Image (spheres, rainbow, N blue to C red):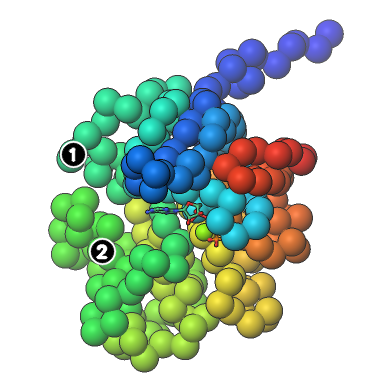
Amino acid sequence: MTTPAPSIATTAPPVISVRDVHKSYGRGSGRFDALKGVSLDIADGESIAIIGKSGSGKSTLMHLMALLDEPSAGAIALSGSDTATLKGSALNRIRNKTFGFVFQQFFLTPNQSVLENVVLPLKIAGVGAGERKRRGMAALEQLDLADKARNKAVNLSGGQKQRTVIARALVNDPRIIFADEPTGNLDSATGGVVEDILFALNRDHGITLVIVTHDEELAAKCDRRVHIKDGLIEAVAA
Ligand SMILES: Nc1ncnc2c1ncn2[C@@H]1O[C@H](COP(=O)(O)OP(=O)(O)OP(=O)(O)O)[C@@H](O)[C@H]1O
Ligand SMILES: [Mg+2]
């Protein structure tokens, strides 16, 4: 006789739950409604692509899920806990501990070394210098960048910069990586390397991937694709 699988595995709350979220920028006649009621659940260990035209609200949605900004209305829960009450240092701690960011606007500090850039999240978390170096070098080794650890970030190639950003995103052993156009400025070979790294983290470490992209091939590799149009989810394709 077969034993039914324990139901606990299927009842785990989504790692991210977005409920009827609205986001407006500006006020009065200058108000713009960037999100108009978006609901989405993301399962732990899932890879999900957010796709849609420029200005449709993709980055806005990602910033809200990453707790970098607050919704105008609606709720965002992390593993079943509402995030609305998180403020200040508690918010920073959760963000720093749980998330890794691969955003083009989160630039590297050009005149700091590659290693110093990578260990920044650990420094923010109060990890000591020796441990920072050990974990920073381990992350750089994973990204095949250990030989560049002492170089200034400014002197790296575009692909090396992007790999450094990924090393920084994973140095804290995050549960979720948020990537906004991770391959946007890269040639297809280098973009392929960056993609392979992200999906290996997903497959081998169970890190949830949330990727905003215009790249259809990259989107096709994700478990699900969320199509956004004019601030609303138009379709979710598995
Ligand atoms: N801080 C802001 N103030 C006012 N409007 C904003 C602000 N941020 C975004 N918007 C507007 O909200 C809409 C959604 O922006 P968002 O950055 O989410 O688009 P996107 O889908 O990521 O586009 P892209 O593919 O070009 O990056 C756009 O019309 C944008 O102009
Ligand atoms: Mg964007």
Q: Is residue 141 visible?
A: no
Tell me where residue 56 appears, x and y as whole percent.
59, 51
Closer to us: 118 or 71: 71
* Residue closest to the eye, 233 or 236: 233
226 is higher (above) or lower (below) than 160: above
Point out the frontmost of discs 2 and 1.
Answer: 1
The tag on residue 120 is 2
Could you tell me residue 91's position as x and y percent?
A: 26, 38
Q: Is residue 91 left or right of residue 128?
A: right
Mark 2 or mark 1: which comes first in sequence? 1
Disc 2 beta carbon < 8 A from ligand 2?
no
Whether residue 44 is visible: yes
**Can you tell which mark lies on residue 88?**
1
Q: Would you place residue 78 above or below residue 208 in this image?
A: above
**Residue pictured at 59% horizontal, 60% vertical:** 54
Residue 205 in the image, given as x and y percentages of width and height = 54, 49
Q: Which mark is residue 12?
A: none
Residue ID at (32%, 62%): 135
- Disc 2 element: helix
Residue, far bottom: 155
Three-letter residue code for mark 1:
Gly
* Residue, far front: 29
Disc 1 secondary structure class: helix
Q: Residues within 10 Å of mark 1 (few under 14, many from 20)?
A: few
Label 2 – label 1 distance at C-alpha:
19 Å
Total number of numbered discs in the rendering: 2
Residue 23 falls left or right of residue 89: right
Q: Residue at x 16, y 52 (%)?
A: 126
Q: Quadrant of residue 232?
A: top right
Q: Name the amino acid type tagged 2.
A: Leu
Q: What's the residue at 41%, 28% (across, down)?
A: 73
